[in-house]
Image (cartoon, helix red, strand yellow):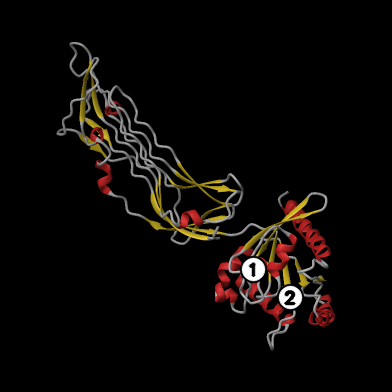
Amino acid sequence: MRFIDRARVHVHAGDGGDGVVAWRREALVPRGGPAGGDGGRGGDVYFEADGQLSTLLELRYRKVLRAGSGAVGGSKSKHGRGAEDLVVRVPVGTDVFYEGHEEEDESAWGSTAALANGTEAELTDGEDDALFEIDGIRRLPPRARKTAHDHEVGERIGELSEPGQRLLVARGGLGGRGNIHFRSSTNRAPRMCEQGGVGERCVLRLELRLLADVGIVGFPNVGKSTLISQISRARPEIADYPFTTLEPQLGVVSLPHERVMVVADVPGLIEGAAEGKGLGHDFLRHLERTRVLLHVLAPDPTPGRVPLDDLEVLERELNRYGPMFRGRPRVVALNKLDTPEGQALLQETRQVLRGRQIPLFPICATTGEGVPALLEAIWRRLEMVRRRESASQG
């Protein structure tokens, strides 16, 4: 399945059904009083977070999300049926942004059904069919309903970070009132009803940010994909050339004593990623909600490339992207320990990182050497962050 982390959709909440003008005719009593029912409400539109989904692929090809409209009111004071809400499932970690308002279609007010078109029904006992007349019926404008949101274009209207969480994105229109509501001491035979409200219509942008405990970052071809395939069941494409991984990968790591953490491997970063170079913006945002960062370094066969310089570039790009990464615990893994270049780099890297109080773990992602110790160190830092979060929440 393709990993799609952005989608743009048009959302149409359902229109409310129109109220009607109808009369109750009892035997020998012409027009025994108003009996026009209310229209049903239009369906709302919700997004709901689903822990089983991992991509916005379905919404990439589903351009319009449309809830049903309410039914028109009936005779004998019967209300029209309300429409069901439309609930659209999205992955956990989806942000929803407001992209603008769609103009309401004025013609929709007169298109629902015959009873809704400013008509009048006169019924006798036992008579099922209504007799209609168009002239002389006053149709009142619909009642306003509180909007689902009032945001500027580009503003985030909500995020879905927990399974089962719902976000209301468009309200359906209220059902119009029938003439039974307009009877008064001065008007016992009101020839008026109310139009159903038009459902909200808007354009939304959805962005998926991976929810992971640990974010794996590094330059292309340092072995990140090999590492995540070693420690989890994730199976990214692996090859001996840069930019093999073009989509973020999620993996679940199981440790002894029933401990579990989720890791995210984003495609290799390059200098200028914070400004979007090499799709840097698309990849870096998947690291925003991680708790621990794992930098992967490795000897690079490219002339002029120095792994320690790579670490400096990675830190600079993270800090330029945003302040959310400052103070986040880091762990550095030096990969390809099984090569002479890796062994030669180990001592130099250890000396540099010791002064920064950043732990270094030499590993071989291919054979698994050093990986268990690396995972335990990551787990300890992850637990430290979790305790700190719990304490801050009281």
Q: Residue at x 71, y 50 (%)?
A: 393
Judge left or right: residue 144 versus residue 127: right
Q: Count residues near mark 1 (Cα–Cα under 10 Å), then give few for <14, some for 14-19, many for 20+.
A: few
Q: Are marks 2 and 1 in contact (CB under 8 Å)?
A: no
Q: Quadrant of the N terminus?
A: bottom right
> Is residue 237 or residue 277 the one in the foreground?
237
Farthest residue to the bottom: give it: 304
- Quarter residue 171 falls in: top left
- Measured along the vertical axis of the image, is residue 265 above or below residue 188? below
- Quarter residue 300 falls in: bottom right
Judge left or right: residue 205 versus residue 225: left
Marks 2 and 1, how far apart at CA:
23 Å
> Is residue 78 or residue 53 the one in the foreground?
53
- Quarter residue 268 falls in: bottom right
Residue for badge 1: 323
Tag shown at residue 297: 2
Residue 327 in view here:
no
Residue 352 in view here:
yes
